Image (cartoon, helix red, strand yellow):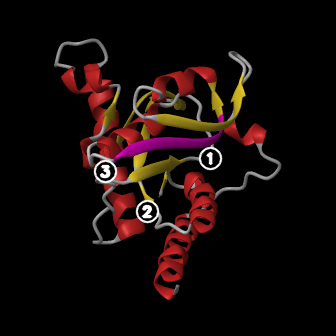
């Protein structure tokens, strides 16, 4: 079981508790337009994951090259810091040969979720499942090519999705400390059983 920080770890923790399975994080960062960071044009993640993959082929002289490269470098550094915060020096759990479930709290563009799925796909899981409470139709379409199965509670109609938070009764900010505590509690629960 893998959760995408921060809110996805909260949801993944609940699922991992019910399935009695280990929990880890997949650190991914949205690539946003300068001045409009919430408007994503892609995502990158730990271990070099990049969506869309075409961003890696950009060359000097291409329109937007400098903006994209600067955003990628900034987000790569943020991702490295988050990995250290959430895992310390511990390596990421491998999903090799197993059924892997990747969870987030919601899906808008799908870029960050696709990057997370790309990280796990490299492990060679037997089956790769995306689990999301709510998603845009376009986002679900995008991630469908990165996984074997999507478990989705609610798909928003095209053009009717404004924010993930609108689909929750309570959608508070989750801190890094809360993520670390959830991961630790799941690890302790696994060793204590």
On whether residue 11 falls in the magenta region, the answer is no
Q: Which residue is mark 1?
A: 105
> Image height check: is 144 above or below 85?
above
**Marks 1 and 2, how far apart at CA:** 15 Å
N-terminal-most mark, 3 or 1: 3
| Residue 118 coordinates in the image, percent (x, y) | 34, 39
Relative to 74, 191 lies left or right: right
Task: State the predominant SS element of the stretch in magenta.
Answer: strand
**Residue 127 numbered tag:** none
Q: Which residue is mark 2?
A: 24
User: Residue visible at 61% across and 42% down?
Assistant: 132
Q: Nearer the viewer, mark 3 or mark 1?
A: 1
Above-or-below relation of 9 to 108: below
Q: Quadrant of residue 162?
A: top right
Report the Cα–Cα distance between label 3 and label 1.
Answer: 24 Å
Percent across and percent down for residue 141 are 52, 22
Which residues fall within the magenta stretch? 126-134
Q: Is residue 96 visible?
A: yes
């Amino acid at each position: 079981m893998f959760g995408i920080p921060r809110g996805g770890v909260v949801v993944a923790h609940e699922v991992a508790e019910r399935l009695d399975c280990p929990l880890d994080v997949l650190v991914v960062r949205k690539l946003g337009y300068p001045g409009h960071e919430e408007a994503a044009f892609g995502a990158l993640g730990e271990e070099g994951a990049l969506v869309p993959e075409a961003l890696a082929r950009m060359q000097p002289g291409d329109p937007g090259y400098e903006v994209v490269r600067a955003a990628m470098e900034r987000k790569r550094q943020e991702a490295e810091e988050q990995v250290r915060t959430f895992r310390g020096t511990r390596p990421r759990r491998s999903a090799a040969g197993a059924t892997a479930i990747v969870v987030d709290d919601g899906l808008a563009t799908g870029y960050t979720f696709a990057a997370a799925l790309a990280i796990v796909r490299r492990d060679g899981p037997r089956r790769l499942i995306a689990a999301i409470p709510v998603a845009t139709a376009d986002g679900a379409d995008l991630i469908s090519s990165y996984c074997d199965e999507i478990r989705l509670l609610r798909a928003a109609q095209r053009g009717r999705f404004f924010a993930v938070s609108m689909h929750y009764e309570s959608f508070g900010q989750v801190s890094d400390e809360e993520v670390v505590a959830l991961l630790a509690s799941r690890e302790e629960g696994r060793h204590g059983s």
